[in-house]
Amino acid sequence: MANNFLQIYTGDGKGKTTAALGLALRCAGAGLKIFIIQFFKQKKYSEHKSLKLFSNITIRCFGCKEFVRNANIPQTLYKKIVNGWQLAKSIILHNPNKINVLILDEFSLAIFYQIIQISEVIDTLKNRDAKLEIIITGRKINKQLIDIADLVSEIKEIKHYYKKNIKARKGFEY
């Protein structure tokens, strides 16, 4: 068995993407090559400025400006997510650029909203490049992914300042 795993960060609490990006930072410091694909997000977050400082981290976004809160996915976003999955699938199966870590941020929602079929994801992950570590983040994770994962961490919300009508803050939420 290879020492490269499938990790999942899920749950309704804040910090799934932050955990994955923290891992990317640690891996970058160790000289590993990281590729991050963000689903449902458009490049507007502060972390993108920081990640540009690392020559061994690449980030691509397949999303839109507004946050998706239900299954009414605009056709343009649907197509972007499918394109993001095609890129991810190419890396997972062929890894042409010898990437060490692939982060699929908010990917679980693409499965939950049935934009990407879980059977295709499972088949792809089972046939992945043995030298590739994969991290998947997002709410509403599919149980089949949990079953094949090597590590699953659930981030649970206990208390959040959003409930006091505090808006997203630069540097903390975006």
Image: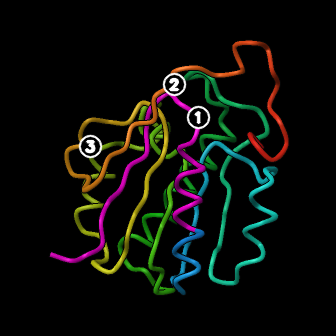
Q: Give the mark nearest the N terminus, 1 or 2.
A: 1
How far apart are the two marked residues, 1 and 2, measured between alpha carbons? Answer: 7 Å
- Label 3's element? helix
- On-image quarter of the C terminus: top right
Colour mode of the rendering: rainbow
What residue occupies the far top of the structure in this picture? 164
| Corner quadrant of residue 58 | bottom right
The residue tagged 1 is 14
Measured from the top left, where is residue 102 in percent x and y?
Answer: 48, 67
Measured from the top left, where is residue 77 in percent x and y?
Answer: 66, 41
Measured from the top left, where is residue 120 in percent x and y?
Answer: 31, 51
The reply to whether callout 3 and callout 2 are in contact (CB within 8 Å) is no
The residue tagged 2 is 157
Of 36 and 17, which appears nearest the observer?
Answer: 17
The reply to whether callout 1 and callout 2 are in contact (CB within 8 Å) is yes
Q: Which residues are magenta?
A: 1-24
Q: Residues within 10 Å of mark 3 (few under 14, many from 20)?
A: some
The residue tagged 3 is 146
- Label 2's element? loop
Label 3 is placed on what type of residue? Ile
Q: Residue at x 51, y 25 (%)?
A: 157
Q: Residue at x 55, y 74 (%)?
A: 34
